Image (cartoon, rainbow, N blue to C red):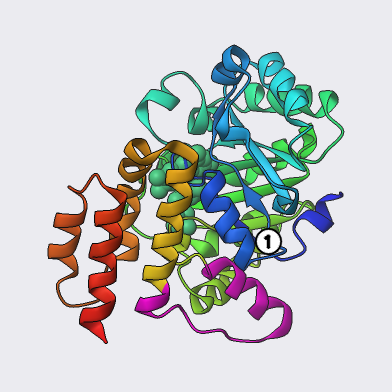
């Protein structure tokens, strides 16, 4: 598939480590048949040592799907990208991760301070694979180093086919507001498609972001948590102008039960029930007693008890 086919829905699932696993990707695909999915970040060091595991799992209908790699060793990343070609429709390189343990090893957003190395990575990967290659980065490392335009041009020159840009600096981490207007400066200076990312949580914010950023599409991260329909609803709106409403509380609870069921199938009850705890704040909010329920459900280890507590909400709210 060519890049234009991969991004034709104009919306993607942004990669989120420990979150956008096989189960969440599957749930989002069932609600968004054409959107671009992305795996969570896969460390090239980890992949080299282990050859993957459930982090690589996919279904036929997951296409179009991009697999994201992190690292800083050009040949190692290129070898991993080659290995992933049997799974992926596109390879994405992480140049935006802000967390300390990643940037201190010159991975993630640290690559924005080392454009020569970033270019070398893109060139080496590009010459090893026959599928499209993208990069994901931020506005810069700090507000004094807003190099996203030059950096994007360099990535394009090195052979990147597509960019996702998060409208924050590394120093902001996830605080403050994503600056969608700045993204337009990048758009005006590169020919490859650009998806804007950061703080898109609804059809309305997607539309506003597209207007301000002039981007070709939007990448959705946290907005998809607790609402597995958001990406599909944005895609539908952008394609047909049809506005589908957000899920009701009952629909959210049903989606959470399905999410839990599939994580338990994948990981077993003990690990699966613990794994889904991070999703509770996103699904279980906006109703009376939500905070108390979250405090209780997060302590529960038995999947059947968790279901009973969730069924209790539906009964109490009707
Ligand atoms: C828990 C979490 C994990 C993330 N993991 C990754 C990752 O593996 N790779 C990456 O490029 N970005 C990662 N991000 C950043 C998101 O892809 C996205 O750029 C950021 O959350 C802003 O978009 P949003 O406001 O739509 O969430 C992560 C973000 C969160 C909250």
- The x, y position of residue 278, in whole percent, is 32, 48
Report the residue marked by disc 1: 35
Q: 200 above or below 271? A: below
Q: Is residue 189 left or right of residue 2?
A: left
Residue 139 visible here: no
Residue 170: percent from left, percent from top: 42, 40
Percent across and percent down for residue 122 are 72, 29
In the rendered structure, the answer to whether residue 188 lies left or right of residue 42 reads right
Q: Residue at 67% x, 21% y: name it.
A: 77
Instruction: State the residue at coordinates (48%, 61%).
Output: 224
Q: Identify the image quadrant of the C terminus.
A: bottom left
**Could you say which is closer to the camera, residue 256 or residue 108?**
256
Most frequent secondary structure within the magenta stretch: helix
Q: Is residue 105 above or below residue 10?
A: above
* x and y, in percent, of residue 88 in the image: 74, 39
The residues colored magenta run 229-251
Magenta span includes 236: yes
Identify the residue shown where x is 53% and y is 49%.
Answer: 23
Number of residue marks: 1
- Compared with 34, 268 (above or below) is above
- Quarter-wise, where is residue 289 in the image? bottom left
Q: Nearer the viewer, residue 76 or 88?
A: 88
Helix, strand or loop at label 1? It is: loop
């Amino acid at each position: 598939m060519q890049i234009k086919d991969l991004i034709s829905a104009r919306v993607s699932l942004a990669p989120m480590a420990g979150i956008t696993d096989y189960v969440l990707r599957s749930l989002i695909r069932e609600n968004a048949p054409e959107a671009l999915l992305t795996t969570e970040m896969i460390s090239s060091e980890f992949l080299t040592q282990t050859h993957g595991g459930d982090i690589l799992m996919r279904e036929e209908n997951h296409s179009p799907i991009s697999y994201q790699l992190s690292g800083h060793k050009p040949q190692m990343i290129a070898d991993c990208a080659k290995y992933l070609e049997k799974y992926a429709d596109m390879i994405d390189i992480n140049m935006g991760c802000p967390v300390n343990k990643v940037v201190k090893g010159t991975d993630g957003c640290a690559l924005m301070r080392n454009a020569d190395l970033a270019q070398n990575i893109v060139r080496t990967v590009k010459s090893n694979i026959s599928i499209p290659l993208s990069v994901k980065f931020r506005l810069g490392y700090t507000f004094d180093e807003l190099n996203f335009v030059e950096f994007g041009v360099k990535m394009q020159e090195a052979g990147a086919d597509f960019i996702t840009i998060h409208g924050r600096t590394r120093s902001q981490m996830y605080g403050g507001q994503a600056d969608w207007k700045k993204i337009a400066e990048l758009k005006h200076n590169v020919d490859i498609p650009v998806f804007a990312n950061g703080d898109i949580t609804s059809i309305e914010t997607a539309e506003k972001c597209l207007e301000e950023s002039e981007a070709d599409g939007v990448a959705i991260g946290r907005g998809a948590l607790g609402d597995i329909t958001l990406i599909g609803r944005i895609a539908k709106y952008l394609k047909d102008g049809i506005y589908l409403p957000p899920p009701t509380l009952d629909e959210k609870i049903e989606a959470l039960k399905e999410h839990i069921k599939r994580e338990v199938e994948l990981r077993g009850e003990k690990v699966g029930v613990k794994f889904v705890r991070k999703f509770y704040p996103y699904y279980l909010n906006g109703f009376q007693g939500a905070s108390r329920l979250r405090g209780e459900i997060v302590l529960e280890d038995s999947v059947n008890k968790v279901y009973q507590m969730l069924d209790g909400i539906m009964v109490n709210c009707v």
